[in-house]
Image: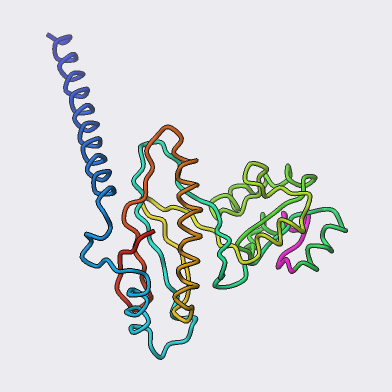
Amino acid sequence: MLRTTVNSLKKKKADAKDAKKKMEIKEFNKLKIKASTPIETHPLYMTIPEAMRYLRAFEVGKSSYDTTLTLQATIVASKGVLPLQGSLALPHPLKETKIALFTTDPEKAEEAKRLGCSVVGGLELIQAVKDGKALDAQQAFATPEIAQQLNQIARVLGPKGLMPSAKKGTVISDIAVAIGSAKGSMPFKQKEHYLCFPIANCSFSDKQVLENITCASAAIRELTEKTASNKTCVLNKVILSSKSGPGIAINF
């Protein structure tokens, strides 16, 4: 009798797990179908010039600081696909990126300062971060000799996307090339099912906005293909919005 009860409980648990898995697959397939639906069918779909006309109207009289245009993309990904993250080197950056360099090489440190790095330091900078000092930068690099020491602050820098690593190409020897290409670049990171980042200002021309969006589209689609490998990872609808304006669906 006891064995029958235990087996019955195991079967119920297995059935519940199976039903949950089937439900997840069903919901995922719905999202995939929705993602393949032409964006033009969205009730608030517009071309980028049309969208800009409306969004600028909502931001009349405000400073450029308050008229940032934001892109939000919905990501449909299979279970186990890593969240998208990286950086965009936009042709028309919103602002210059603050860069940090970890190095114990005095010559590299001087060169980094000349190149405009906001924060430059070695072991003393690592200690400062360990002690709770915020790293005032949007991107961080390190020279090879100090890379191992950064493990001490990986838990601080990692969640902020600031942990230099050879895999990401941010442990560098040629700092002039790396810092030069990073200036004006903008980091982004997927949170849950969404990728959201500033793309332009209302003061930008339609051509500048379009060029920034085209650049972002190419970079993110390439990253999506690399991240997904043999799994599914696709972009669903992409929304362009301003601080006071509505969210408008656009081609991406």
Locate residue 248 relative to residue 187 in the image: left or right.
left
Q: Quadrant of residue 106?
A: bottom right
Spot the residue most to the left.
1
In the depicted structure, whether residue 70 falls above or below residue 224: below
Locate residue 57 relative to residue 181 in the image: left or right.
left
Q: Image point 54% across, 52% down: which residue?
A: 86
Residue 242 at x, y = what percent?
38, 74
Spot the residue most to the bottom.
61
Looking at the picture, tell me which residue is in the foreground, 204 or 195. 204
Q: Image point 35% across, 38% down: which residue?
A: 78
Residue 38 at x, y = what percent?
26, 54
Locate residue 135 relative to residue 246 in the image: left or right.
right
In the depicted structure, whether residue 239 falls above or below residue 25: below
In the depicted structure, whether residue 239 falls above or below residue 95: above
Residue 130 at x, y = what percent?
67, 54
- Which region of the structure is painted magenta? 116-126
Looking at the picture, tell me which residue is in the foreground, 172 or 91. 91
Which quadrant holds the N terminus? top left
Q: Image point 64% across, 62% down: which residue?
A: 135
Residue 170 at x, y = what percent?
67, 50
Numbered label tally: 0
Looking at the picture, tell me which residue is in the foreground, 224 or 151. 224
Q: Image point 36% across, 71% down: which residue?
A: 241
Which quadrant holds the C terminus? bottom left
Colour scheme in use: rainbow
Residue 205 within the segment the image draws in magenta: no
